[in-house]
Amino acid sequence: MSENNEKEVLKAYEKYLVYFLNNDMDGINSLVKFPITYIADGECKSLNTFPVKPKEMMDSKQWDTTIDTNTYTHGTNSTKGHVISSGTRIRKDKSVIEKYTVFYAFTKTNDGWKMYAISDIILD
């Protein structure tokens, strides 16, 4: 596993996270290789749009911030990288909404690292 690839993949993920938290769909889309595969409960979907609209998700869950995050690359090579992130989403009053884990797959393109698959799990 190349340390440089690992750093580049993590940097792409960190850019995605900033765009997500700022509800910047153009930014998010700039980091996605469409179609993107979304692994949902019991099915895979090939989508030409990102599977989540951050503002709608934040509003519907009354999500204020995330705590206890843990993010790391779980493997990279010169063409592919995996990122796993987990944490706890909370409301403004600090009450817990949910605990989650998400898997992201990235691929190296001529325009840099792009996300091409995502799978999220809300933990019971």
Image (cartoon, rainbow, N blue to C red):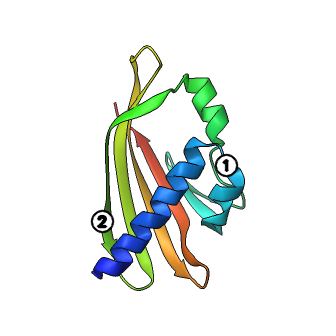
Residue at point 59%, 51% (across, down): 19
Which residue ends up furthest to the top in the rendered image?
A: 93
Q: Which circle, 2 or 1, is nearer the viewer?
A: 1
Which quadrant holds the C terminus? top left
Q: Quadrant of residue 98?
A: top left
Residue 83: x and y in percent read: 38, 61
Q: Do the residues labelled 2 and 1 touch (CB within 8 Å)?
A: no
Residue at point 34%, 73% (across, down): 6
Which quadrant holds the N terminus? bottom left
Residue 57: x and y in percent read: 60, 34
Q: How crowded is mark 2: few (under 14 residues within 10 Å), some or many (20 or more)?
A: some
Residue 27: x and y in percent read: 66, 57
Q: Can residue 41 be seen in this view?
A: yes
Residue at point 43%, 78% (across, down): 80
Q: Inspect the image, locate mark 2, and give the three-letter code of the amino acid beneath it.
A: His
Q: Quadrant of residue 86?
A: top left
Q: Sequence order check: which comes first, mark 2 or mark 1?
A: 1
In the figure, 77 relative to 34: above or below?
below
Residue 38: x and y in percent read: 56, 56
Q: Inspect the image, locate mark 1, and give the three-letter code of the amino acid beneath it.
A: Asp
Residue with the mark numbered 1: 24
Q: In which quarter of the image is residue 87?
A: top left
Q: Residues within 10 Å of mark 1 (few under 14, many from 20)?
A: some
In the figure, 71 relative to 37: above or below?
above
Quick one: SS at disc 1? loop
Residue 6 numbered mark, or none: none
Image position of 69 (left or right of 63) = left
In the figure, 5 relative to 49: above or below?
below
Residue at point 34%, 80% (across, down): 4
Measure how far apart labels 2 and 1 are at the Cα level.
26 Å
Residue 74 numbered mark, or none: 2
